[in-house]
Amino acid sequence: MRLGIMGGTFDPIHKGHLLIARSAMREARLDRVLFLPDGDPPHKLPGTPDAHRLAMVRLAIAGQQGFEASDMELRRQGTTYTVDTLEHLSALAPGTELLYIVGSDTLRLFPTWKTAWKVAALCRMIVAPRPGDSPEETRWLQRKLFADYGLETLLLSEPGPDISSTRIRELLRAGQPADALIPEAVAGYIRANKLYRE
């Protein structure tokens, strides 16, 4: 079993997340992709209540083969660290190959992660290039992280779309439409629950 793990604040989840997950599933031959909304991540604090973010993830992936959502990190007390999630998943499903999906911007932060060497021992990483990134610089970083931490990485062939949750929130707060950037069901949920308004 090859399990892809996609963590994030998902505030809100958008079409870029889904495209990257599908690319990862295809290129890394994943059996499943598990979407894990962050509870209390060390690098970024979500502004929207957990229940809303989890509901939007579930709506976004509904009916998509191989995609699942989990509230595992939302239920954990205190700061949520990737290493704890990986250890928990390893214990739940021994023998499952764990592949953590990140953007190339997140990969640059890897040396700052809690027990980065242990993360490298627990999983491989699938890296989605950011638009405008230098492939040469990303490949250099992959080699360095392997040399320093033993981290094995797979670089996806295409960059993810230039979409960010921050930009979506800005558009919605300004009263502008963002429907082209988010799944239809998520757009409906945001309107129904009056999220991202001033």
Image: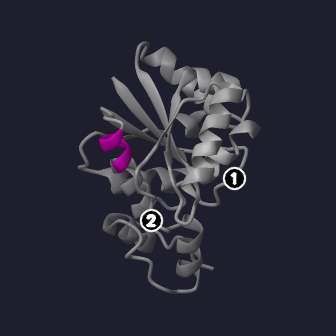
Q: What amino acid type is highlighted by mark number 2?
A: Pro
Regarding residue 141, the answer to whether it shows in the image is yes
Query: Residues in magenta?
Result: 23-27
Kindly identify which residue carries mark 1.
44
Kind of residue indicated by mark 1: Lys
- Which of these two is toward me, 81 or 75? 81
Q: How far apart are marks 2 and 1 (CA)?
A: 21 Å
Q: In this view, does 61 lie to the left or right of 47?
A: left
- The mark lying in front, picked from 2 and 1, is 2
Q: Residue 5 carries which label?
A: none
Residue 39: in sight, yes or no? no
Q: Position of residue 81 (x, y in %)?
A: 66, 34
Q: Eyeballing the image, is 198 above or below 48?
A: below
The N terminus - image quarter? top left
Mark 2, residue position? 161
Q: Position of residue 85 (x, y in %)?
A: 57, 29
For residue 113, above or below residue 176: above
Q: Is the magenta stretch mostly helix, strand or loop?
A: helix
Q: Who comes first in sequence, dot 2 or dot 1?
A: 1
The kind of secondary structure element at disc 1 is loop
Identify the residue at horizontal 63%, vertical 80% (top origin): 198
Label 1 Cα neighbours within 10 Å, binned few <14 / some 14-19 / many ≥20: few
Taking the magenta stretch, the answer to whether it contains residue 62 is no
Q: Which secondary structure lies at badge 2?
A: loop
Q: Residue reaching furthest right?
A: 112
Task: Look at the image and say whether residue 24 sits in the magenta stretch.
Answer: yes
Mark 2 crowd level (few <14, some 14–19, many ≥20, 10 Å Cα): some
Asked whether the residues under the numbered discs 2 and 1 touch, taking CB atoms below 8 Å apart as contact, a structural biologist would say no
Q: Residue at x 60, y 29 (%)?
A: 151
- Residue 136, image x and y in percent? 58, 52
The residue under the point 30% across, 43% down is 26
The residue located at (57%, 45%) in the rendering is: 139
